[in-house]
Image: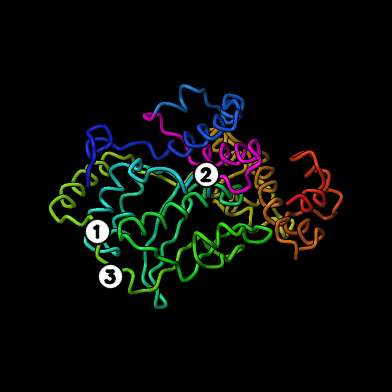
Amino acid sequence: MKFTRSRGFNSVPSATGGIARLACARLKEMGKDPTVILSKVGLTPEEARDPSVRLEVRTQIKLLELAAEEVLDECLGFHLARSFDLREIGLVYYVIASSEQLADALRNAERYSQINNEGVRLRFSMRDGAAVIAVDYVNVDRDADRQHIEFWLVTLVRICRQVTNGRLAPLRLKIKHFRNGMPAEYKAFFGVEIEFGANADEIWFPRPIALLSLVGRDERLNELLRRYAEEALARKPRERLTVRSKVEDILQELLPHGRATATEVARRLGMSSRTLSRKLGDESTSFAEIQDQLRAALAKRYLQDKTLPISQIAWLLGYREVSSLTHAFKRWTGTTPQRYRSGH
């Protein structure tokens, strides 16, 4: 196992920016100027190129979705994850790769992935006769994303295969968002049918796989690397749930019942409407903006499930009339729900 000083254990390369840089590189390969898309997510080319600049996960999600549209690649996250050098992940990758068994590697991934990622958490567990890797978003709207989560799932499978030097095939692969059919290259890569529209983002491997020894296992090196990783964790500031994320959670429950008002959300949070407005202002947002963005993301997700009537989608989003959904959707996307569904 080799690593250089610049990418070794004395530094933590910015995974919270690496995906964005991969997307910008792909744009350039396709003859597109990344500057336009970067400006839409509030970044300069200099910030995007700088590995020391930490990018929010929601910024990377938005950038990937815009880049996918620009290069006409519905599977951009999948394609980017297939081709990058896993060693670019840095310290966390080397901790994983030097572990004794795959189960140890995945437990280390769960603990130390938060060093590089503010909005993504990994969970490893043994349940129902399987070794399960789950990907959770923290303070990030999962419904707005397809490309970013697919990048993560492909990367995790690649890591498991590389560190065991085996063509591991999952038992199950669950993904929350919808796709209209499963691309053939997904089946070829994962070796299993993907459960789109599931209740979680999870990779399930047969339980015995967790006991596989790693080809790069090195007890002394792993102990040293984990010491550096623990120091990096200790330097991270304590995170707290944002008011925005709490509002989003409550809104998803209230929207179908037509009670998604700032007053009701504030009551559930145990504060006044004025206090809620002030706290959201401190986070540079507002209740109306959060509700509008959440509805837009949910609408796109629901429309990809062609078994859901548009009238039911309108109800799920808190609209009494389909015409209200149509008017809002045209404002969000420039097209109608029916046309959007047909195009996806």
Q: Nearer the viewer, mark 1 or mark 2?
A: 1
**Residue at (70, 46) in percent of width and height:** 296
Q: Which residue is mark 1?
A: 215
Q: Which residue is mark 3?
A: 211
Q: Which mark is residue 243?
A: 2
| Horizontal and vertical percent position of residue 267 | 60, 52
Q: Which mark is residue 126?
A: none
Looking at the rendered structure, the kind of residue marked 2 is Val
Q: Tell me if mark 2 has few (under 14), some (14-19) or many (20+) residues whose alpha carbon lies within 10 angstroms of its own.
A: some
Tell me which segment is drawn in magenta: 51-77
Looking at the rendered structure, the kind of residue marked 1 is Val
| Horizontal and vertical percent position of residue 73 | 62, 44
Q: Is residue 247 visible?
A: no
Q: CA distance from mark 3 to mark 1?
A: 13 Å
| Horizontal and vertical percent position of residue 66 | 62, 37
Q: Nearer the viewer, mark 3 or mark 1?
A: 1
